[in-house]
Image (cartoon, rainbow, N blue to C red):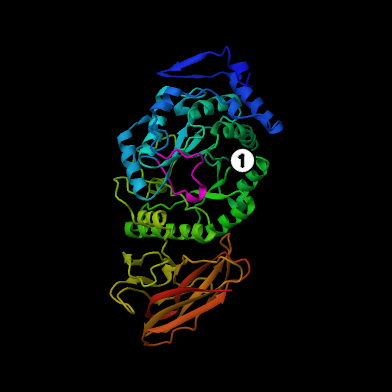
């Protein structure tokens, strides 16, 4: 008799709709005993001890993905985080609209994605016993994903904090995952989104539930996601907590600028090796606040994804998963989820379904592994007097404008005129180039063309260096542009990255100038070590 049969006999069989399965506290407790036993007695066979499955559910599930014996390799993940535009968090399930979900999955698949993240709010589904209605909806979502050649990241225990209820947690997780063990439709299973494992009760809960999840998942990969807080504190804590029983991969969420993000991801990768690292969330908002422009906000988001995906490619990890597929409508986020205005506009599509420029960046990377390193160095793109991709520093100390009617080789440049400045603040256009520091002592060269009219101050091209915490480490500059009237003149600066530098920044600066200067055709070249 198997280890399960002794306690399954006599359990009450519950029927939900036309699905039947076993549930009892004794099963949960025995599962904990069983998993503990397998750690000590490795000869026990998991196959021999499998729980009954929902046969009727399994028979009606659409199996349009290949029935592989092994899961999709992490290296092949191209994942999209997902909620419908008008159905964030709990409302994806309460405002049930499978027609819209399917239409969204069609577009996600067309981008080249092969995994979609589906997040399950625990209390909405019912705790500790999930509702048959929501279980049915989950099965339909998984089937719709499979129909569109998408596997699913099942993220469990969302919006749930009762970590003291271990038996309830195990019961809920068991019922949710029944029928999905070793399922090729599942890319991986995530125990909890951004679990704060530096909090002792949460750490204890993760430690307790993780081996149960491993058993219930079978060959499906498992993980728990984390934020990349300062010094990777959460990742250090989880790595220590699960060192003897690590996840299939570590899942981090990264929202810092790409220069800082490269260092964070590289440090995380080194910390958890040989277990792989994955960026399960990343993104930038296109929210238009007072003083901003929708064209520039869309361009900034696109530029952000160029930088992040360049980071992942250089570090040899899968593409980072965008947060999120679509913007939310004004009523698309429930009041129980506290969200500021920025949080509504992280989508690659607008809430009306129109793709933003970032969608093309992500789609190209998903499909072909290609990411552009362009940073609008020819200033061909801009709006409302400002160039795309570039930021203005100390703009209140002069007139700094995008000039679409003047340029070096083609129309488009930036103009700096009537500037003042101080020892700590020179009016500048600045940009963090896509290609950053990948090894210590790496050298870079920047060039640009500038010309002046009645120029009387100092105009320089420069490279600034910053540490991973954003601290300024120094700057190297070109020779200044000649005063007075000048034709287009090439300026250049080059230097090796100083010790501790995490990322560079290009600057075009002009100070104490009563005239005007224009700069264009900025190029950036890594020179190696």
Residue 81 appears in view: yes
Near-viewer residue (4 or 499): 4
Local packing at callout 1 (Cα closer than 10 Å; few below 14, some 14-19, many 20+) is many
What segment carries the magenta color? 65-82
Which corner quadrant of the image does residue 83 belong to? top left
Q: Which residue is mark 1?
A: 197
Please report the residue visible at 38 percent of the width from the left and 33 percent of the height from the top.
Answer: 62
Q: Say which residue appears at 71% left-offset and 32% top-offset.
A: 40
Position in image of residue 278 (x %, y %):
53, 49
Locate residue 394, reporting x and y percent.
45, 68
Magenta residue check for 75: yes
- Of 141 and 465, nearer the camera is 141
From the top left corner, tell me how far across and down residue 217 is, in percent: 54, 34
- Furthest-top residue in view? 10
Residue toward you, 445 or 99: 99
Q: Eyeballing the image, is 28 above or below 455?
A: above
Q: Which residue is drawn at the image coordinates 46% and 34% (left, top)?
A: 120
């Amino acid at each position: 008799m198997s280890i399960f049969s002794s306690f399954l006999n006599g359990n009450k069989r519950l029927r939900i709709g036309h699905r039947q399965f076993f549930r009892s506290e004794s099963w949960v407790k025995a599962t904990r005993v069983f998993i503990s036993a397998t750690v000590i007695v490795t000869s026990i066979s998991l196959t021999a001890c499998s729980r009954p499955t929902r046969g009727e559910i399994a028979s009606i599930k659409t199996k349009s993905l290949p029935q592989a014996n092994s899961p999709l390799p992490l290296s092949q993940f191209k994942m999209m985080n997902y909620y419908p535009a008008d159905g964030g968090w709990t409302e994806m399930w309460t405002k049930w609209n499978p027609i819209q979900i399917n239409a969204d999955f069609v577009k996600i698949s067309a981008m080249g994605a092969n995994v979609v993240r589906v997040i399950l709010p625990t209390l909405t589904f019912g705790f500790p016993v999930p509702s048959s209605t929501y279980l049915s909806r989950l099965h339909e979502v998984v089937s719709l994903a499979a129909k569109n050649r998408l596997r699913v990241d099942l993220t469990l225990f969302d919006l749930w904090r009762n970590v003291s209820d271990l038996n309830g947690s195990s019961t809920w997780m068991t019922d949710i995952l029944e029928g999905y063990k070793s399922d090729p439709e599942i890319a991986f299973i995530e125990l909890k989104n951004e679990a704060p494992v530096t909090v002792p009760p949460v750490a204890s809960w993760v430690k307790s539930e993780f081996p149960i999840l491993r058993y219930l998942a079978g060959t499906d990969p498992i993980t728990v996601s984390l934020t990349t807080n300062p010094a990777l504190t959460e990742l250090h804590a989880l790595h220590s907590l699960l060192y003897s029983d690590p996840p299939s991969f570590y899942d981090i969420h990264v929202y810092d600028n790409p220069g800082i993000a490269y260092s964070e991801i590289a440090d995380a990768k080194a910390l958890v090796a040989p277990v792989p690292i994955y960026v399960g969330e990343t993104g930038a908002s296109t929210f238009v606040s007072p003083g901003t422009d929708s064209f520039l906000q869309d361009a900034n988001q696109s530029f952000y994804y160029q930088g992040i995906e360049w980071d992942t490619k250089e570090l040899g990890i899968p593409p980072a998963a965008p947060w999120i597929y679509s913007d939310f409508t004004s009523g698309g986020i429930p009041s129980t989820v506290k969200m500021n205005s920025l949080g509504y506009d992280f989508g690659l599509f607008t809430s009306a379904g129109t793709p933003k420029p970032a969608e093309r960046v992500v789609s190209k990377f998903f499909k072909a592994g290609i990411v552009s390193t362009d940073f609008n160095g020819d200033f061909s793109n801009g709006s409302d007097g400002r160039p795309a991709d570039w930021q203005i520093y100390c703009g209140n100390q002069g007139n700094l404008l995008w000039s679409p009617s003047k340029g070096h080789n083609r129309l488009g440049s930036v103009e700096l005129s009537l500037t003042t400045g101080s020892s700590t603040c020179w009016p500048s256009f600045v940009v963090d180039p896509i290609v950053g520091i990948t090894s210590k002592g790496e050298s870079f060269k920047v060039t640009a063309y500038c010309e002046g009219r009645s120029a009387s101050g100092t105009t320089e091209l420069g490279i600034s260096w910053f540490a991973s915490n954003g601290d300024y480490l120094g700057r190297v500059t070109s020779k200044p542009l000649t005063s007075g009237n000048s034709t287009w003149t090439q300026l250049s600066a080059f230097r090796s990255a100083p010790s501790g530098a995490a990322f560079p920044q290009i600057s075009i600066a002009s100070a104490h100038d009563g005239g005007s200067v224009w700069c264009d055709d900025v190029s950036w070249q890594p020179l190696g070590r």
